Amino acid sequence: MTEQRHGGASLDGLGLWLAAPAPGDDTDGILERAARASEVAERAGFTSLWVSEPGGRQSEGAPYEAYSLLGALAVRTERIHLGALADGAERRPPSILAKIVTGVDVISHGRAIFTWDPGAGSVDDLDRLVESVSVGRAVLDDERPSLSGSYYSIDGAVNRPAPVQIGGVPIVVVVSGDGQRRADVLDAVAGRVDAVVVHAGADGVEEAVRAIGARGAQGAADASKRPTRVVGVLRASGSPSTHGQRAAELTAAGAAGCLIEVPYPWNPAAVEAWAERR
């Protein structure tokens, strides 16, 4: 595998998550709304921008295709990194997703993020998760990747044009659920991915930091292991005066970054309010 430098620093700091519109929302001008919010976030110093990938279960259908929207936003921004957050439904093989993410990376001149969401499945899904990450990494990093696994196989899957991001495209796994499920997912991906997004409060973030730290200590002699960051999530609701305090609590718990979930219609003023209170 081609040696890559660690690319997870793009997950540090604040990220802006544009939550999906609800069925029935007026989505006219959705690209312009997303572009305005993205431009404000970039000027304010946010390090990453995320769009939701709505599932097909919505009664009125998804309002956009996430990676198409990211491709459009790539030409409206210059520095901010770009990722998508799914709802836990597996809709693409990891090799196809890696190719799509590569397209965003090329268009954005090296700002894409590869995200995998295993959902709240059973412990039996962990082998599939690890294999998915391995396939995604191989397609993103290798010239002619080949891998034969229990769930996925690729044979000379040439990915051209290749990603252009210095340090390689960061791979992120979304960790949902709690208790043993969350602990098992963290144990499976620690040292394999650049970051985990944890849908939990400060206690959950602190737990994830401890789990990844313990796993990292066990594999300290393994040169193939990657430092894995923990990223927390906050929803932009309630009094704006509490936003900074809530983000600070996640940072104090050990989170390297924090994603701020802003509800549709993604009011740029709300984005600016977060920036002022970070």
Image: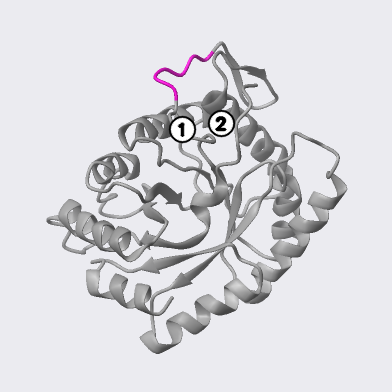
Q: Is there CB contact under 8 Å for labels 2 and 1?
A: yes
- The extreme top residue here reads 156
- Horizontal side of 90 relative to 190 (left or right) equals left
Pointer 1: what residue? Answer: 97
Q: Is residue 238 above or below residue 170?
A: below
Residue 136 got which mark?
Answer: 2
Name the magenta segment's main secondary structure. Answer: loop
In the rendered view, would you say 261 is above or below 82? below
Sequence-wise first label, 2 or 1: 1
Q: Residue at x 84, y 51 (%)?
A: 217
Q: Residues within 10 Å of mark 2 (few under 14, many from 20)?
A: many
Pick whichever, 43 or 182, lies toward us.
Answer: 43
Label 1 neighbour load within 10 Å: few <14, some 14-19, many 20+: some
* Magenta-colored span: 157-162
Instruction: Name the secondary structure under disc 1.
Output: helix
Residue in view at x 68 percent, y 37 percent: 130
Q: Nearer the viewer, residue 152 or 269?
A: 269
For badge 2, the amino acid type reads: Gly
When asked about the image quadrant of residue 261, the answer is bottom left
